[in-house]
Amino acid sequence: MKNNYAYNHKPIKFDFQQSIERFFVEEIPLYKPTGKGNFLILKIKKQDMSSWKLVTVIAKATGLAERDIGYAGLKDKSATTIQYISIPKNVEKFLNKNLTTDKVKILERYYNKSPIKIGELKGNRFVIKLHKVSKSEAQNITNISTKLARLGFPNYFGYQRFGEDSLSYEQGKEIAESGKRLKGVKEKLLVASYQSHLFNSWLSSRVNLSTIITHNSINNASKILSYPKELVKVLSKQPQFFKLFIGDVVTPYPYGKSRFVRDMSSSATLFKEAKIAPTGLLCGENAIRAKSDAYHLEEPFDDRELYALKGDRRLAWIWAEDLSTSYDEKSKEFIIGFYLPKGSYATTFLEEIAKQKLVS
């Protein structure tokens, strides 16, 4: 599964390995704890441990059922991560006594009136160490990452979503279209990977369409796309790379109430200013679908038989914020830091910079 890249710079070479020494991520919560209440909020640093394993460890230490432990999002095992966990206040003494693993460190504690729920986070702050970076490539990484922070980039699901062989979505498609009720976490993940595959395929097609309009004359783009010249002319006047169509579903950035594009010019201006962003379909039950011209671009990547999961919309275009870079010429190590909204992948940002896959 190959994603199209938005920018036309030459591929950049660097060594990336996702490990506890090279990959750091910190969860940015949606709100601050109140300081009072019946729930204990734990700010936890973990290494070489998935979020699911962390929940299991906390459950074992406290005697809680895993369903009674709250968390906002899942973090990778092969990383040093900081995330927030909630547990009932009355089991704190058991946690203090029984949590002994060196892989988990409680950094801070707060009390709150409610537990943490899935999705209750703003985003994540990443710091990543890249190795074997030449001096010229270090400058290229700095230049391109700065450009992406300013102009944005496609919000593809990362390779982690699709399993070790990147083909888990095929199993997910079979399960989703069988009509049976999902059994267990594994089947849900497989179907979610199929849902994500459809999104990525749609987004890649829109990036390709936008590339054709951006890098060709109106006449050539019209011939390649079989679009009327007047439509291509209107699309080419949009100042941003990713072209909006009538009926696209956009949302205030980074989140807010979705609406349909009715005027391409005014919507494009807001998009250019990062005030709104287009969204793509996560097909499933009760999903909002694009209309008009945008629907015809979305429909080939829609599966109306996918009822096993709840449908949704996902940001198709995002901006990296709080970008920082540093380079050590002697060790050839390049350190890049940035913030992304929730649900977005640091590896997607790195692949757009590298203009090639990070893993084969």
Image (cartoon, grey):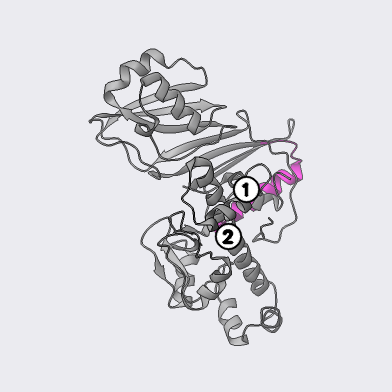
x and y percentages locating residue 330 in the rendered image: 75, 31
Q: Which residue is disc 1 drawn over?
A: 168
Q: Secondary structure at mark 1?
A: helix
The front one of 5 and 271 is: 5
Mark 2–mark 1 Cα distance, whole angstroms, equals 13 Å
Q: Amino acid at mark 2?
A: Leu
Q: Residue furthest top?
A: 97
Dot 2 crowding, Cα within 10 Å, few <14, some 14–19, many 20+: many
Which SS does the magenta portion mostly show?
A: helix
Q: What range of the chain is rendered magenta?
A: 130-156
Q: Which residue is disc 2 drawn over?
A: 198
Rendering quarter of residue 298: bottom right
x and y percentages locating residue 116 in the rendered image: 34, 38
Q: Identify the residue shown where x is 57% and y is 27%.
A: 48
Dot 1 crowding, Cα within 10 Å, few <14, some 14–19, many 20+: some
Above or below — where is 48 with respect to 195?
Answer: above
Q: Identify the residue shown where x is 48% and y is 57%.
A: 314
